[in-house]
Image (tube, helix red, strand yellow):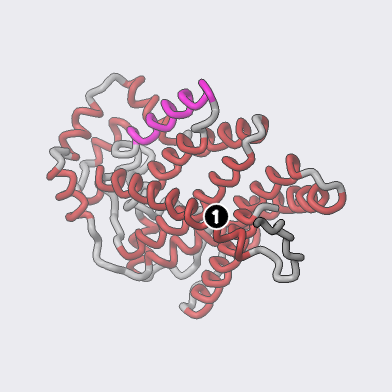
Amino acid sequence: MSNLMKFNFLVIAFLTLSVAIMTISWGYSVPPVEEFLAVMLPLALFVPLALFYTYLRPDQTIATPFWNFVLYAMVIPPVLIFGQLVITFNFPLVDAKLAAFDQALGFEWPRAIEMFISLPDWVIAVSKELYNSLYRAAMVVAIFLIFSGQHKQLEELTTYFILTAILTNLISGFLPGASAFNFFETPAEVYQQFNPVVGLGYMDDFYALRNGSITDLKLDINGMVSFPSFHTVFALFLIYVMRNSGVFRYVIALWSIGIVLTTPFDGAHYIADLVGGAILVVATIAFVRWLEPRLDRFFSSPFAEPKLVPQTQ
């Protein structure tokens, strides 16, 4: 197991412990056990296989993909619960500032929506499918990286997902946004014309967590994050990890750019959310590059025999 993967397990362990302490001390109830089944079943399958190919019949080309799947399954529940807990910080909404940023760039969100709903129906349908396809694109990328032997890039993608899933939720706790649809009080008929993913009632749980009317946390919950846009973040990471993948990288780049372009409409995001997501991507890549050589020293055994270096005259 690589040092980067060990780091990911430590991050998940710290997150899980923190979430457990916050949930209990703040008086919230954990989701029912049945909601964890979708995670427990993959873990029951992948953990034994990962252990088998790590220790009993060592083969890192097989073990590494299984460990990555284990990490995804382990991080999703605490991230979803963490995202709900940080909303209860109840900091003032920043929608007015996000909208002002957009306006300074010349982007008038209500006018953009009017132009969008005037497009042919097939364009609107394709937009919705693109927005919903983020995790399908991620699965395609993961499978490609596995079978092309690019396990280092696969580990990078997993690391970026874990770190930014936590960070986007944390940032949104301190800089919460209620989505552009709610801020601009979009009329119901506009929703009906193109039925966006972030439609009527999508943010009900967000408001309920802020006003304290929800005390039972759950895993089956709508997205809580407006700023920065996680769709933008993860779509850009898909482009980055495919940088050494020949022609196929252009396919993923077009797909990912399409996802990003749909976020203001089907995701009700501000342009500021996209910009914030892009900045987070650059910062996370820089952090991981800085971190990796230091992990080698952190995880090195203090009992390892020192290597003998020949003396030179």
Report the residue that reaches farthest toward the right: 56
179 shown above or below 117: below
Report the residue that reaches farthest toward the bottom: 25
Q: Is 251 within the magenta?
A: yes
Picture quarter with the C terminus: bottom right
Q: How many marks?
A: 1
Q: Looking at the picture, tell me which residue is in the foreground, 57 or 184.
A: 57
Q: Is residue 269 left or right of residue 77?
A: left
Q: Residue 174 occupies which quadrant of the picture? A: bottom left
Three-letter code for the amino acid on which mark 1 is drawn: Glu
Residue 68: percent from left, percent from top: 64, 48
Residue 123: percent from left, percent from top: 33, 22
Q: Residue at x 61, y 42 (%)?
A: 152
Q: Residue at x 42, y 51 (%)?
A: 286
Residue stretch in magenta: 246-262
Residue 237: percent from left, percent from top: 46, 41
Circle 1 residues within 10 Å: few <14, some 14–19, many ≥20: some
Residue 78: percent from left, percent from top: 55, 62
Q: Residue 309 occupies which quadrant of the picture? A: bottom right
Q: Is 59 within the magenta?
A: no
Report the residue that reaches farthest toward the front: 313
* Overall secondary structure of the magenta section: helix
Q: Is residue 287 left or right of residue 154?
A: left
Q: Residue at x 37, y 49 (%)?
A: 202
Q: Residue at x 25, y 28 (%)?
A: 117
Identify the residue under disc 1: 292
Q: Looking at the picture, tell me which residue is in the foreground, 312 or 43.
A: 312
